[in-house]
Image: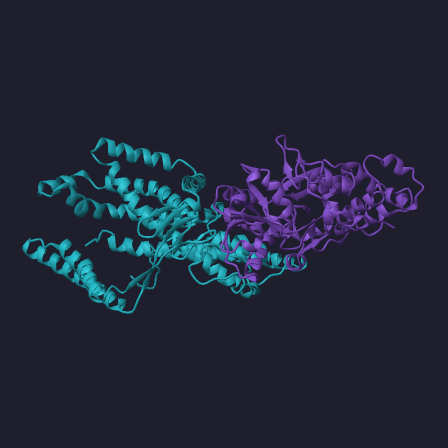
Amino acid sequence: MKRFATVLALSLVVAAQGTSAQTLKAVKDRGMLNCGANGTLAGFGLPDAQGKWTGLDVDFCKAVAAAVLNDPEKVKYVPLSAKDRFTALQSGEVDVLARNTTWTSSRDTSLGLNFIGVNYYDGQGFMVRKTLKVNSALELNGAAVCVQQGTTTELNLADYFGANKMQLKSVTFATANEAVKAYDAGRCDAYTTDASALYAERLRLANQNDHIILPEIISKEPLGPVVRHGDDQWFDIVKWTLFAMLDAEELNISSKNLDEALKSPNPEIKRFVGTEGNYGEQLGLGKDWAVRIIKAVGNYGESFERNVGQGSPLKIERGLNKLWTKGGIQYAPPIR
Amino acid sequence: MSGKLPSPSRPAQVVFYNDPKVRSVVYQLVLCAVVAFLVYGAVRNAADNLARAHIASGFGFWNDTAGFDISQTLIDYSARASTYGRAFWVGLLNTLLVSALGILFATILGFVIGISRLSRNWLLSKVAGGYVETIRNLPLLLQLLFWYNAVLKALPDIRESIVIPGGAFLNNRGLFLPLPIFKSGFGAVEIVLLAGIAGTIAFHIWARKRQARTGQQAPVLWAALVLVVGLPLSAFGLAGIPLGFEFPQAGRFNITGGIEVLPEFVALLFGLSIYTAAFIAEVVRAGILAVSGGQTEAAYSLGLRPGPTLRLIVIPQAMRVIIPPLTSQYLNLTKNSSLAVAIGYPDLVQVFTGTVLNQTGQAVEVVAITMLVYLVISLATSLLMNIYNSRMALRER
């Protein structure tokens, strides 16, 4: 009888996946957004001692919750390791995955996922000890490199060493925590991951100043939030949440001047805040959807500076992540 | 009396649907059909849902290029030329290697501890008891992390390696040993060695027969030493020492060449062996205590010393009790080796259900294959142990 029940439960679980086409309704019924987050990466997703989550990706989860549920705190953060994250999204355990995930063609297609855009343009780098006197990644021939499993990083590493005819000794760990700990213990000469994460992980090492980050960026790592295939309405909502944050910055709308923006005669701003047109309803949300987002987390620039930029311990330059109007490549289609 | 009448003792005819035998068969069939239908439904449902979500399915990924590096490969493997299928075999061999060595060490250690715990030496038995009670009451994962950190933290950095005489190095990147390279002429040494082993076995059989016939013992140990060690060594010398070594060399970052034993491997092997040995020790102790004390007393009264008594009288009888639970311990060790994932040893689970699953996204297929593999390994181990058990079992005459 027990086996009987197990089979029954299994088939129900499998059957439940089929109903995922109605994500918006499911989230509203639940009153809570399930958001796949990192959980160990400062600047992107990390809970503090009180269990309060912060980070660029966490802000994105809050923005979606604000747009959909009108409350940025109605988010259940599900900490996921790099290797488990896609299965969690595929199986419906999370509604959106915002976990510094690199957009690649195979993930977009054969994994049954949709990337909604890029919320951080990153690239892969290396961290080494200063005592090694290495100045370039091309000098790493024969080095042992600690790397996290289930990442594009793991693949780029093998590609880069192969393409430059260098010997590689990679040591692979299931989580970034273990990989960094092993690097710190001297198991590896170098630690490799996305450059933004290198700055974040360096803060956790025993002696931060003994380590340098090499200048080479060996790959393109466009990091973005992800949703499942097959629910276009939900895909649109999550996508336009990111666009709204970017458009707000371009229109100089921030969490500080929101009240003025609501009274603005500028037609672009009026469309954004919902005093003109019904763009929110078209998404299946209210007129003030974008206002709710900005009220909750601010525009993209505010979120960037607060989490990874000058207002954070990481102090990462915006670089490529500046708006297209300011020399970067962050660009969002207009709301109209 | 006519024989045509039904005998009064024959049971009354029952309608077939009231026959308990027929009923039970029907119930079994119905249950099987329902279970088969549910399984079929679950599989169909999963396949439909995967198709609807546009998640790739099938086993086509097996021949795709893997593209990632693996730190310990017993067969040729390269990130850019090998397939996911090859990565699977690499992971499987790593699992088998650590399991086989783990079983060997756990058995030796377990027998030593188990017997020590019954020793009349107070200190020895208390130390063995303390070992068992400490080790088997701590979670294995914790012990693995302890061993890994103990290995990494206690050993020096690669640039301050401990140099072991003979060209070996020890540091926190592992143990680096010279790799023997066999030159031409080594074949002769191997033949002599094989002949020596065959000769030893033949001598052993002859010695036992003679002992059974005459009661005289032959110096089997000395003969074995001469045949297995002495003869091949002299052949080795006569052939002109046909053996070279590839010594590990310190490079810019790492030591290259030679045999490399990873610290992850050592930590996993230590952890698994020491943990399982505690359980095996208890199994052995139980087995020995199950042999009645009269057997030992009878052996002593025949004039046997404690050593031969244990070896010839107690252990062979204890084995009958020991082998079945020992099999479960072997299976546990093999399955526990999947905890390698926590300390970065590239076993089957780490490589296949870790990286390959993530890169291909085909969780259903990858997990199914992995479960099948563990099932096959476990059933094969059980089979071997059952054969051994039936050989050791009490022969009833």
From the viewer's side, name the closer residue of B6 and A133. A133
Q: Colour of chain A?
A: purple
From the viewer's side, name the closer residue of B133 and A197. A197
Which chain: cyan?
A: B
Residue lying at 15% horizontally and 45% vertically, measured from the top left: B308
Residue lying at 17% horizontally and 59% vertically, measured from the top left: B230
Q: Is residue A93 visible?
A: no
> Looking at the image, which residue sits at the far left?
B214
Lateral position of residue B315 relative to residue A111, left or right:
left
Lateral position of residue B24 relative to residue A149, left or right:
left
Picture coordinates of residue B362 (x, y %)? Answer: 58, 57
Image height of A28 relative to A104, above or below = above
Lateral position of residue B307 relative to residue B18, left or right:
left
Q: Quadrant of residue B297?
A: top left
Q: Quadrant of residue A158?
A: bottom right
Picture coordinates of residue B40 (x, y %)? Answer: 57, 59
Residue lying at 72% horizontally and 47% vertically, measured from the top left: A319
Picture coordinates of residue B171 (x, y %)? Answer: 41, 46
From the viewer's side, name the closer residue of A21 and B220. B220
Q: How is the image coloured?
A: by chain
Q: Quadrant of residue B55?
A: bottom right
Q: Is residue B168 visible?
A: yes
